[in-house]
Each structure stands twice: as C-alpha cells, then as structure tokens.
Amino acid sequence: MHAQSINENAQRLLEAGESARAYELLQQAVRDEPTQVALWINLAASLRGLNRPDEEMAALDRALALEPCHAWALLQKAYLLERGGKSPQAAMTYRSALQVIPPGVELPAHLHPILGHAQSVVEANNRALESFLAERLKDARECHAGMSLRRFDRCMSVLLQKQRIYRQQPTFLYFPELPTIEFYERADFPWLDALEAASNDIGVEFAAAVADSAEFQPSVAFREGVPVNMWGELNHSRRWSSYYLWQEGVAFPKHIERCPRTVAALADWPRWDANGPTVFFSVLDAKTRIPPHTGVSSARLTIHLPLVIPPGCGLRVGAESRSWEPGKALVFDDTIEHEAWNDSDTPRTVLFLDTWNPLLSEGERDLVRRLVAGVKEYYAEA
C-alpha cells in the first residue's frame, strides 16, 4: 500500500481512538518509507495514545531530523516535554514552533487554542527567566551602576520577547553596514544648537505661515491608480499637512522669504542633498495617527524640531517611543518602522528636515548623490 494511503488510514484510526491499530500500520510504513515525515509524526501520535513517551520522543526526533522546522512536530514535542515536567525545554520548543509559522498566515480554527497555549507557556517561561536573571545579575548591575545600561536593557528585553527586533527597511536606497539605531544621541549633532536656540523665532514664523492655510499641502498625495496601502485614510487629506521650504531639492521661494530666521538657523546644517534637501513645517491634526511606515534611504537621518506639542502626542521608532519636547530636537532613522500620533484636541507641529547619516564618508556621499541622480535621470519620463 502506498505510504500516503497508509497514513490516511492511520489518521482515521487515530481520530477514532484506535491507537494500537494505527501503530501497527505506521510501524511497518516507516520501515518501508523511512523518509516520510508525516508517517513519523502520526507514529508519534499513536505512541502517545499507547502511553509510550520515550518511543514517542524518538519518533518526533526522527521527524525533526528529516524536517527541522516542521511546526506540528515541534508542537507535539513541546507538549510531550511539558507533560514530562520539563517546562524550560518545553517553552524553548514551543518558541521554535511559533517562530517557524510565517506572520500573517491564516491558520485553521482548530489550531488557535493550541497556538494560544504555546504562547502562554512561552510567556510564562519568559517571566520566570526574567526573575531568575534579575537575581543573577543584581550584583553586576550594582557594580556597573555608573555606566549607561540602556543598550544592555534593550538586549534583555529582546531576549525575553518584551520587544521586537526592528531593522532598516528603506523603500528606495539601502546603504549597508550602518548601525540600526532608532534615536541618535542629540550630542552627536552640535550644529543643532543653533536650530534649537532659534526655536521660539521659528515658532513665530510658523504662526505667520499658518495664516496662509492655502499654502499647506497634504503630506500624502498619491496619484490616482497608485497603490496607497496603509495611506488610504490620509491620502490627499489635510489632517496631516506640510508647509515646505524645500521639498526634495525644490525650493519654495515665497515660503523661504517668509521664514528668514528659520533659514538662518540652518546655516551649518549638513543637508541631505542626494534627493533633497527637504525642510517643512509638519502639522498633525487633532485625533490623527500616522500609520507605521518606513522612509526612503538609510544614508540619511530625519530630524524633528518640536514647536507646538499638546499633551497626548508621541513618536515610536522601532521599539522605542518618545514624546516631543518643544525646542528639543530628535534625530532618528526613519527607515526603521515608525509611527506618530496626536490624541489631543489641537494640532501638533514640528519642523522636519533631513541630514546625511554622519557615518558616511565624503566619498560615499558623493557616490550616493551621483547614484540617485542617475536613477532619477533613467526614470525621468516615468
């Protein structure tokens, strides 16, 4: 009999609770077809029904030797370890099973409680491990109390699955071997001193610009026929709008003339000029959220100078969330998934500008400029 037919017959016997008869069929089948993963998995199920855990484990290990990332075999093995009182090993195996299931895949309803149980075991183990490690690391933390532990704490949070790992995912140009840093240290950008010192004057110029509301453009404006994905709600909406001084290298002379103090404060700004510069007042309306998204190139960084920040506003970049403080610039990598929100009843305003990632050499910047210019030239007609 063909291995698939034997497996189907054995499956029916298992569903009927006839583990012994299923075992007889499957024992012979794995001798004849020892490379068939499904046979080993069902053989393990029959051995579970016969309460022969050591043989069940051996059958599951054979299945996983053939296909190490088989989710169902991993789930069965984890459950067997859990029944045997081996909680940490069970949690590690459940975690492996959950990791091999592609995100967003639609699973049969009967698997939902099984996966929910797996997740609860993993979470309980993470919290037990957290308590264990807190005790083990207590003396070391006291020893190193004088140094910043921020990066180590992030390392721990990822290990304990309290935070996701976020990586750069630019929509256009990826520049390799740059560190994945959500928010850069403000002190590494001394030229921002002049910008922050002028924040009150910049706010006054923004207030004057607001009077000419017709000059504000929707920040998202896809042409008809272009897939808008997550931007559907904000596409061509004034709920998130921009007043440009420069937009991807195109100057707005009238706006620049209206904002002389803002322009003067940018005198030492190392402007991103590969496809820029870009500077604008970004206004996020009350009760509005900018959905998670990523920017165009890891060769640049984004800067927000907060101007008008009502309560209930925030910015998440990767796993780190911050609140804006008026007059205090934030520097972040927008190719890492990020989102912003305004839960207040009044608009939020920041001055947006972009700059070169400081870790690129002058030669690399020159090459990136030429590369981007070449791409634009190639696609000029499109």
Image (cartoon, grey):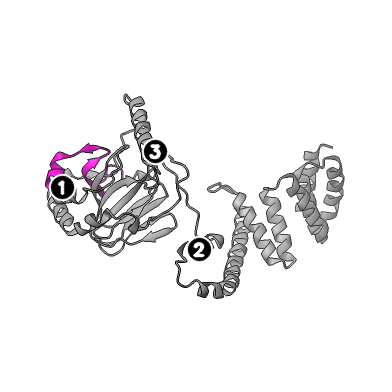
Residue 352 x %, y %:
27, 49
For the N terminus, the image quarter is: top right
Look at label 1 and name its amino acid. Ser
Which of discs 1 and 2 lies nearer the camera? The answer is 2
Residue in view at x 73 percent, y 65 percent: 83
Q: Report if residue 309 lies within the magenta region.
A: no
Judge depth for marks 3 and 1 and give the one in front: 3
Q: Quadrant of the C terminus?
A: top left
The residue located at (65%, 58%) in the rendering is: 94
Q: Estimate the x, y position of residue 327 in percent, counting from the top left.
A: 24, 60
Element type where label 2 sits in the image: helix
Disc 1 crowd, CA 10 A, few/some/many (<14, 14-19, 20+): few
Q: Which of the two marks, 3 or 2, is nearer to us in this view?
A: 3
Residue at 47% in and 61% down: 151
Label annotation for residue 213: 1
- Viewer can see residue 12: no
Q: Verify whether residue 257 appears in magenta.
A: yes
The disc, 1 or 2, on the residue closer to the chain's N-terminal end is 2
User: Is residue 76 in view from this perspective?
Assistant: yes
Q: Position of residue 75 (x, y in %)?
A: 68, 55
Q: Mark 2 points at which residue?
A: 152
The reply, left or right, for residue 370 in relation to residue 11 is left
Q: Which of marks 3 and 2 is nearer the N terminus?
A: 2
* Residue drawn 21% across the image and 44% down it: 244
The residue range painted magenta reads 235-258
Whether 216 is drawn above or below 346: the answer is above
Q: Marks 3/2: CA distance?
A: 31 Å
